Amino acid sequence: MSNLDRRSFLKHTAIAAGAVAISGLGARSAKGAYGHLQAGLGDGGYGELYPTRSANTGELCLELPQGFRYTVLGRTGSIMSDGNPTPRAHDGMAAFSDGDTIRLVRNHEINNQRGQPGASIAGNAPGYDHSAGGGTTTLVIDPSNRELIEDFVSLNGSLHNCAGGPTPWGTWITCEETTMGRTIVVNKKNKSETGGFDQDHGYCIEVDAMASGPQEARPIRSMGRFVHEAIAVDPATSIVYETEDHNYPDGSGFYRYIPDVPQQLARGGKLQMLAIKSKSGYDTRIDQVMGAELPVTWVTIDEPDPSDASTDASSVFKQGHAKGGASFNRLEGCWYGDGNIFFTSTNGGDQKLGQVWQYAPAGAGDGILKLLFESPDKALLRAPDNICVSPRGGLVICEDSAPSVYVRGLTSEGRVFDVAKDLAGIEVRGEFAGATFSPDGETLFVNMQRPGLTYAIWGPWHQGAI
């Protein structure tokens, strides 16, 4: 995508103006009805958003609060330092410190549905499955100007790499949001086929953030084979919390993985699913009360890598649910912060607009689950996806609600506010993904999945909750 020309600029401006003219009054009315759930300028929020041009390309890609700026990085199709074109479908991401630079490890949610020889994003470089099109890239960033120094493929031959999460020991866990594999599955309705890959998929894979090229991919099978989305690690215990992005008839699950050896996940461990004490099969999808505390227990998954996962993606969930595990409506983002695990239910709640949950662990014990926020109106929050915790304690939430999407903020008191609005992805139904702060807390990096851009956003973050 080249810099926006005058015609494109006018088109985007007209779209933005039309949206205000048609729905602005309704949005303001909706927000006014829920003022107690909003954080305005001075009490957590950053104020109104304004169309803002990129500092390095001049493109009009975002609306931001006054005083904020951004650069555009890592565009789909641009040639990387290793000679490979930047893959499409930017998704989950995390930032790591590397001396005087910042490293971003970024997922690419490429799902080619059917195994294809040579589909991998780095050609014949080391890879788990060369018939699979997903993986990760690593970007090295100069923090002084938020510009790209170097970029390259860092994981090759995985599939549908949606989100994941950073570990305290300097790695990125990338998660496959599929259970397709060697088995060919025929859709009886339209006769289409999926599967036929060289390897099975549906796993978590660990990526060294400091690697200089593609690494050998080793699926961590004991972490489960299901429709993964994101993970978060409790640094006090090395326990990994995992979300499942699906809505089977009975819902999806929230899991934890207790490694046998701390920080060495591939050496084995125990996979468990969250349940609510004394409430077997508890359904969190509707009829919940914000702020109510639910005591938690955990049930063990006997077969974390079931043989029938290729044909039944719910195989792991069914095991946990049969033992009384709780149900959620499409779990996506997951992040650790201040002793808690925060995660999102994209379609949860009475209005199916999304929920934000907080889990307070009790070491390797049970802990407490609390509904931090449930959206009553799409003008406040719709389809929360990837999240991260800011250095100042607030939550950054990426919406997956095309064609109009926002990055929202959430205070520790459970009040929402706008952080950024998309302009670049409107025509291609883009979605924000991969929000993560630089180690010094000064820059928010976030992806626009379509058309495939990474943004570095900076400004007076200290004036608000994030």
Image (cartoon, grey):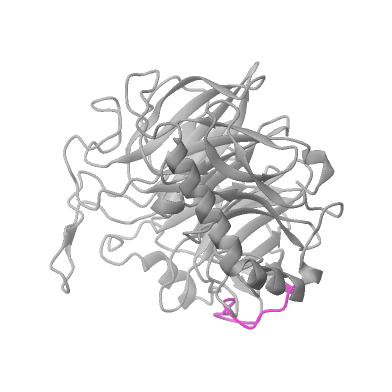
Residue drawn 46% across and 33% down?
207
Classified by dominant secondary structure, the portion drawn in magenta counts as loop
- Residue 151 located left or right of residue 282: left
Residue drawn 53% across and 70% down?
347
- Residue 25 located left or right of residue 248: right
- Pinpoint residue 276: horizontal percent, then vertical percent: 64, 75
- Residue 194 located left or right of residue 393: left
Pick whichever, 93 or 73, lies toward us: 73
Pick whichever, 102 or 248, lies toward us: 102
- Pinpoint residue 36: horizontal percent, then vertical percent: 81, 70
- Can you tell which quarter of the image residue 68 is in? top right
Q: Is residue 441 magenta?
A: no
Q: State whether residue 291 appears in this view.
A: no
Residue drawn 75% across and 76% down?
33
Q: Residue furthest right?
A: 42
- Pinpoint residue 78: horizontal percent, then vertical percent: 37, 27
Q: Is residue 280 magenta?
A: yes
Say above or below: 460 vs 352: above
- Can you tell which quarter of the image residue 216 is in? top left
- Residue 332 located left or right of residue 121: right
Pick whichever, 69 or 200, lies toward us: 69
For the N terminus, the image quarter is top left
Q: State whether residue 408 appears in this view.
A: yes
- Pinpoint residue 197: horizontal percent, then vertical percent: 20, 47
Residue drawn 20% across and 43% down?
198
- Region of the chain picked out in magenta, as a range: 278-294
